[in-house]
Image (cartoon, coloured by chain):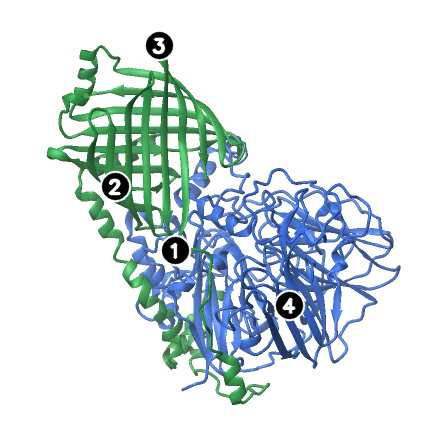
Chain colours: A green, B blue
């Protein structure tokens, strides 16, 4: 948990500085370029050219690798005399025109492989919330469409109380893998609630942190200089392979006061949840849990003025499903 | 010709837990081939037809099958799953007219058979595939003998049932004798449409792993190994974001394992007479499953691998990679029945059959082995004090220096160091600070690669994960040696190193971090003798198959050792083999795990005349 906390703290500070996302991508991206071209050189072309120096080393390398690196000097000498030029025991059959025709037939199309584009839609939380004097509902969903490297992401979160939607948003993001575990995302976020609907530009990073923390951090820039940031992390504790405890934290911060929506600048809210689900199948897992939420700073002040509680702890029950 | 299935015995849904079926793939013709209820317990086991001669008519069609209690569509040949056994003779010219009665393109590839490129049956490389309603005629000379197999090379049709055995009788008598023989074709079946199974892997690659380590396992490990060691272990895996129980991508949670087209409850039975020597031709026709095979009570003498004779080696058990074949001789005596027990590598299920003096007998099945857990050593991340290091380089100098020449300046150690410098996101393996194994530049910072091996070794004498120290003699590549000297005899003129790469979570698979569609063909010069060195940079085991030419596996001294058509590459291994480029044309070269190939773990090998 300590690791998670320091990670969060670190990520939060980074996410709040908008430059970071770009730095990050910058840092990771360049290797993608050499990744496409020079690779061929290594595998095919370098070797296709008859380079005696290279061959010697290749032969030597093999021996060296298998038997230990102390050996190379010896092996190097042994292998140094280059490829043997003698004829094969089984002669190579001379080629006829019929062979040539059979080897390279005219083809109408290239090879078909499984589709590159796939999709994933998950309702991580679809739950009923035990609120004061009534009931509420909440959801968190995400989806991606696309390839291994380039994806369209949809993310949505929201909650209802007493039949009224208190908060709801939808993000539409382009995500690109910049390293084995991290995607950078950029796009728009639409807040349906609270208050009047509004748009944000969104930039962020998401992925799987070391120790398998699902992590995302997003910075938002809205109208009239409004800024916001959200950091979210989830973890899975396997009590058994089907009974899974999922701790989750989410922190929201805003750059400016927004009295109309009851939001103060700085750290606004922190949420922590603990949900215990049972995976009847991978795709369908009901859960129960507890969700704690607390407002800070100006947001807490607003709540006090409105006579709302600054801190809530609520029971939740729901399902997690994906397709 | 299509009536041989009617006698098939239906497997009851014995071990199946749940199979979430989606839309059907292929087309169920409902041709009345299938009419036995799922509970049928009498009747003959499914035995594929044997077709012999030089002229063959094969018809690819969709037929309903039932291995789990649910009737599902399969892709069949002459109405049969597996497809009929084709019996050829070395020296003959065979003609195979293959009709496609599916509504989609199809193909048949003759696995391990030397033939002209346009007869190899790979759509997009050898030919245009067989279009619906068309018949393609394959004709080629048989220049080899032994046990092989054939299967579709069109998308996922192989998984859906299009696979069968090929037996080629030698012109000269075999160097061993036997009184009777059986084909034992192992495979994996899913009720899912294979394409939707692929999509599922892309959504959630760990779907089938219900053996991840739990909180309880943590405390067990603490009480066994101590807190510090357990935390270190969990830390290593956690930083890699990997799971040491990921032995296979798809397991018995999804699959039903078949032996000659029979689920375990179908109990395929091969007969023997007392005192007979029985040749069993094992073929792994699975899409994704490695099997560990034994016949409790019998020693098995392996006499051929991938159709090619080897010095006989007697074992209790062997691991058969996808697409490999092993011919073994057994001499049953003293019991009326013996179980053929083939558990999957991850110990989640098994295929089984029986050798018996008459139909209807069963032998007790052995208890499944404990489920193995991968170690850092297994993945070639052995620390300084581990066995993996003993064969490896002692320091940076040797390993790097050796590679620089081969891979060019950009490749060598720089790749490793660059990776190291990638910062917080660098490979966990870097923690070991080794750096013996260099990696291609295309792997550096590549989002499609989730690990790189640090100090891989050939591991030719390693029985494999889950088979070490099990009290049985287990076959290894080191123990198998071709019965003949290197038929070519030349030293390789050059070496081409390829890394097997992937990303478990993304279910992305590639060579050198480049998928098939993003890579140039590997070019070989007609007539040359060259060497391929494979390095496994993943935690999975991959069977690598080169079409059209043999893969002559080298021993640890770089000498000709074992002729193969499919080379098994466990995690943490670096293995080399010689290729004699005596087959002009465009050839497929790929991981024979079907879903890995479809995800991009494939290259075209183009053998061209020297300019």
Chain on which label 1 sits: B
User: Residue B29: x and y, percent?
Assistant: 64, 54
The answer to which of B394 and B50 lies nearer the viewer is B50
Chain on which label 3 sits: A
- Point out the frontmost of discs 2 and 1: 2
- Does the residue at mark 1 contact the one at mark 4 (Cβ under 8 Å)? no
Q: Which mark is residue B434?
A: 1
**Side of B370 where A287 appears, left or right:** left
The answer to which of A257 and B475 lies nearer the viewer is A257
- Point out the frontmost of discs 1 and 4: 4
Q: Secondary structure at mark 3?
A: loop
Q: Which residue is at 71% across, 42% downward?
A: B367
Q: Which residue is at 11% across, 34% downward?
A: A225
- Point out the frontmost of discs 4 and 3: 3
Chain on which label 4 sits: B
> Which residue matches tag 3?
A133
Q: Secondary structure at mark 4?
A: loop
> Which residue matches tag 4?
B306
- Does the residue at mark 2 contact the one at mark 4 (Cβ under 8 Å)? no
**Side of B156 where B381 appears, left or right:** left
> Which residue matches tag 2?
A204
For disc 4, the neighbor class at 10 Å (few under 14, some 14 to 19, many from 20) is many
Residue B469 can be seen in this image: no
Residues marked 2 and 4, same chain: no
**Residue A74, relative to residue A127: is it above or below?**
below
**Residue B519, relative to residue B250: is it above or below?**
below
Q: CA distance from mark 2 to mark 1?
A: 34 Å
The answer to which of B221 and B174 lies nearer the viewer is B174
């Amino acid at each position: 948990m300590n690791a998670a906390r320091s990670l969060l703290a670190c990520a939060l500070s980074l996410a709040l500085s908008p430059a970071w996302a770009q730095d990050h991508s910058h840092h990771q991206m360049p290797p993608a370029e050499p990744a496409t071209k020079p690779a061929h050189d290594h595998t095919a072309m370098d070797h296709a050219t008859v380079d005696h120096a290279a061959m010697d080393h290749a032969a030597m390398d093999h021996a060296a690798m298998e038997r230990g690196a102390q050996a190379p000097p010896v092996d190097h000498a042994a292998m140094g005399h280059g490829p043997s030029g003698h004829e094969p025991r089984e002669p190579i059959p001379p080629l006829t025109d019929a062979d040539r025709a059979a080897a390279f037939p005219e083809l109408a199309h290239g090879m078909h492989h499984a589709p590159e584009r796939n999709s994933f839609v998950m309702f991580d939380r679809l739950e009923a919330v035990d609120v004061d004097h009534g009931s509420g509902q909440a959801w968190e969903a995400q989806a991606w469409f696309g390839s291994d490297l380039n994806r369209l992401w949809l993310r949505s979160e929201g909650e209802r109380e007493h039949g009224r939607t208190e908060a709801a948003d939808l993000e539409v993001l382009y995500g690109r893998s910049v390293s084995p575990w991290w995607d950078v995302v950029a796009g728009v976020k639409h807040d349906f609630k609270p208050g009047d609907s509004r748009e944000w530009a969104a930039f962020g990073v998401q992925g799987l942190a070391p120790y398998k923390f699902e992590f995302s951090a997003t910075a938002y820039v809205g109208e009239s200089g409004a800024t916001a940031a959200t950091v979210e992390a989830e973890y899975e504790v396997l009590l058994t392979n089907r009974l899974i405890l999922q701790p989750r934290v989410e922190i929201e911060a805003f750059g400016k006061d927004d009295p109309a929506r009851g939001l103060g600048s700085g750290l606004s809210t922190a949420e922590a949840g603990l949900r215990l689900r049972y995976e009847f199948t991978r795709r369908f897992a009901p859960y129960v849990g507890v969700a704690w939420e607390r407002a800070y700073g100006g947001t807490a002040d607003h709540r006090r003025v409105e006579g709302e509680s600054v801190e809530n702890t609520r029971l939740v029950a729901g399902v997690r499903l994906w397709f | 010709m299509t009536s041989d299935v009617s006698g098939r015995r239906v497997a009851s849904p014995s071990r199946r837990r749940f199979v979430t079926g989606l839309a059907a793939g292929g087309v169920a013709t409902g041709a009345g081939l299938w009419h036995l209820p799922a509970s049928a317990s009498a009747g003959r086991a499914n035995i594929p037809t044997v077709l012999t001669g030089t002229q063959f008519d094969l018809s690819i069609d969709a037929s309903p099958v039932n291995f789990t209690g649910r009737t599902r569509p399969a892709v069949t040949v002459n109405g049969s799953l597996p497809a009929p056994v084709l019996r050829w003779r070395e020296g003959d010219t065979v003609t195979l007219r293959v009709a496609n009665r599916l509504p989609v393109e199809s193909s048949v590839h003759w696995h391990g058979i030397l033939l002209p490129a346009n007869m190899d049956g790979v759509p997009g490389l050898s030919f245009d595939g067989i279009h619906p309603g068309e018949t393609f005629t394959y004709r080629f000379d048989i220049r080899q003998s032994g046990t092989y197999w054939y299967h579709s090379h069109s998308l996922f049709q192989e998984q859906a049932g299009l696979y069968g055995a090929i037996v080629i009788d030698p012109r000269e008598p075999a160097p061993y004798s036997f009184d009777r023989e059986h084909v034992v074709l192992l495979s994996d079946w899913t009720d899912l449409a294979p394409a939707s199974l692929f999509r599922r892997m892309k959504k959630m690659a760990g779907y089938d792993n219900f053996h991840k380590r739990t909180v309880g396992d943590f405390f067990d490990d603490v009480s066994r190994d101590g807190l510090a060691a357990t935390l270190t272990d969990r830390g290593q895996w956690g930083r890699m974001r990997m799971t040491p129980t990921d032995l296979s991508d798809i397991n018995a949670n999804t699959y039903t394992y078949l032996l000659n087209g029979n689920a375990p409850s179908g109990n395929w039975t091969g007969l023997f007479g007392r005192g007979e020597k029985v040749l069993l031709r094992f073929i792994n026709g699975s899409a994704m499953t490695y099997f560990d095979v034994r016949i409790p009570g019998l020693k098995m003498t392996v006499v051929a691998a991938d159709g090619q004779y080897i010095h006989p080696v007697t074992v209790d058990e062997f691991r058969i990679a996808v697409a490999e074949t092993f011919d073994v001789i057994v001499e049953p005596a003293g019991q009326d029945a013996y179980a053929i027990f083939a558990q999957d590598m991850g110990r989640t299920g098994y295929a089984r059959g029986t050798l018996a003096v008459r139909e209807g007998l069963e032998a007790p099945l052995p208890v499944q082995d404990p489920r193995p857990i991968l170690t850092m050593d297994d993945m070639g991340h052995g620390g300084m004090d581990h066995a993996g290091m003993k064969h490896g380089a002692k320091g940076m100098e040797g390993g790097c220096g050796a590679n620089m020449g081969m891979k060019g300046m950009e490749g060598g150690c720089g790749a490793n160091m660059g990776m190291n410098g990638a910062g917080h996101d660098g490979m966990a393996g870097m923690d070991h600070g080794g750096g013996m194994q260099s990696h291609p530049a295309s792997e550096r910072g590549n989002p499609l690669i989730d690990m790189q091996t640090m100090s891989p070794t050939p591991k030719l004498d390693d029985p494999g994960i889950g088979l070490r120290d099990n009290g049985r003699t287990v076959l290894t590549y080191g123990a198998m040696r071709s019965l003949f000297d290197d038929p070519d005899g030349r030293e390789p003129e050059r070496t081409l190193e390829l890394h097997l790469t992937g990303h478990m979570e993304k279910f992305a698979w590639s060579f050198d971090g480049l998928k098939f569609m993003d890579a140039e063909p590997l070019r070989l010069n007609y007539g040359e003798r060259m060497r391929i060195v494979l390095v496994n940079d993943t935690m999975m085991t991959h069977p690598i198959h080169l079409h059209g030419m043999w893969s002559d596996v080298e021993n640890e001294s770089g000498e000709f050792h074992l002729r193969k058509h499919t080379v098994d590459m466990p995690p943490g291994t670096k293995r080399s083999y010689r290729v004699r480029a005596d087959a002009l044309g465009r050839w497929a070269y790929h991981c024979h795990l079907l879903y890995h190939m479809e995800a991009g773990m494939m290259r075209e090998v183009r053998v061209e005349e020297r300019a």
